[in-house]
Image (spheres, rainbow, N blue to C red):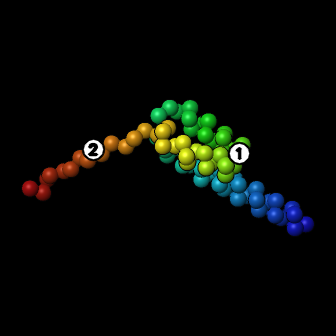
Amino acid sequence: MNIIIFSQLVLILRLGFLYYYARELYLTPFKRRNNKFIWFFVVLIFGLVGYSFCIAFKRNLVRKRKFAPQFNNHYQ
């Protein structure tokens, strides 16, 4: 009985992790759109090890942010 409860808890935690990871991928601006699907399946298959690889290689796959503020000078 305890094994069943433990396995259900692990399944719920894994699904929650996948949900938050999918949300993170959705908000991340990759250079190529297909990279989102590839990394989601890598994490789905390999779990936390896949997530570690994603964090390690994400730097080269994501578009760099550009600092271009639009200041409004209407107080002068």
Residue at position x 65%, y 54% from top? 17
Q: Which one is nearer the viewer's eye here, 74 or 41?
A: 41
Which SS class for mark 2? loop
User: Which amino acid does the dot numbered 1 rest on?
Assistant: Phe
Mark closer to the observer (1, 2): 1
User: Which amino acid does the dot numbered 2 rest on?
Assistant: Ala
Which SS class for mark 1? helix
* Mark before the other along the chain sequence, 1 or 2: 1
Left or right of 16 in this view: 54: left
Which quadrant of the structure image shows residue 67? top left
CA gap, disc 1 and disc 2? 38 Å
Residue at image mark 2: 68
Label at residue 46: 1
Q: Residues within 10 Å of mark 2 (few under 14, many from 20)?
A: few
Residue at position x 55%, y 46% from top? 56
Q: Is residue 48 above or below residue 5?
A: above
Residue at position x 76%, y 56% from top? 11
Left or right of 20 in this view: 59: left
Q: Residues within 10 Å of mark 1 (few under 14, many from 20)?
A: few
Q: Is residue 32 above or below residue 13?
A: above
Q: Quadrant of the C terminus?
A: bottom left
Left or right of 59 in this view: 15: right
